[in-house]
Image (cartoon, grey):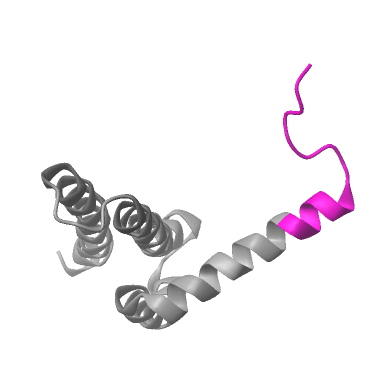
Amino acid sequence: MPNSGFRGNPQQLWNALRWSLRGLCAGWRHEASFRLEVLLAAVLVPLGLWLGDGALEKLALVAPVFLVLAAELLNSAIEAVVDLVSPDFNELAGRAKDLGSAATFVLMVLTGGSWVVVLGARAF
């Protein structure tokens, strides 16, 4: 049976944590959009936890914010690989970058929609 991942080896867990933290640092260092979204998350997450009435509302306000951050990191990874493989303009490379950006945008819309639905329901 092939190795299917973590089997209790603390070194593997430690390496996975290190690589993840390295990715977060790279996102912060190289991606202005990620820095902006982290700063927005620093405001929206505590605000969502404070404004949410009950666990489900808190989740509906906070989870999409983290999804945006994850999508931005994936989009940045796509862009880095595309730039490495295709430094010259290529229609497919451009499409890949645009699709990654669109995924982040869709999750931003979800975030805004969640906030409108949860907080708007109280206003009416």
Q: Quadrant of residue 109?
A: bottom left
In this picture, residue 26 sits left or right of residue 68: right
Kindly tell me whether residue 41 is visible in this rendering. Answer: no
In the rendering, at what x and y percent does residue 68 appear?
A: 35, 61
Magenta: main secondary structure = loop
Asked whether residue 53 is drawn in magenta, I would say: no
In this picture, residue 46 sits left or right of residue 92: right
- Quick check: 108 above or below 2? below
| Front-lying residue, 47 or 88 | 88
In the rendering, at what x and y percent does residue 12 appear?
A: 80, 50
Furthest residue in direction left, as rendered: 91
Give the magenta part as a residue range.
1-15
Furthest residue in direction front, as rendered: 88
Residue at position x 61%, y 61% from top? 20
Furthest residue in direction top, as rendered: 1
| Front-lying residue, 109 or 70 | 70
In this picture, residue 88 sits left or right of residue 64: left
Q: Quadrant of the C terminus?
A: bottom left
In this picture, residue 100 sits left or right of residue 54: left
Q: Quadrant of residue 19?
A: bottom right
Q: Quadrant of residue 111?
A: bottom left
Q: Quadrant of the N terminus?
A: top right
- Quick check: 29 above or below 116? below
In the rendering, at what x and y percent does residue 34 appear?
A: 36, 73
- Quick check: 31 above or below 59? below
In the rendering, at what x and y percent does residue 46 appear?
A: 46, 79
Residue at position x 15%, y 46% from top? 95
Kindly tell me whether residue 86 is visible in this rendering. Answer: yes
| Front-lying residue, 53 or 83 | 83
Asked whether residue 7 is drawn in magenta, I would say: yes
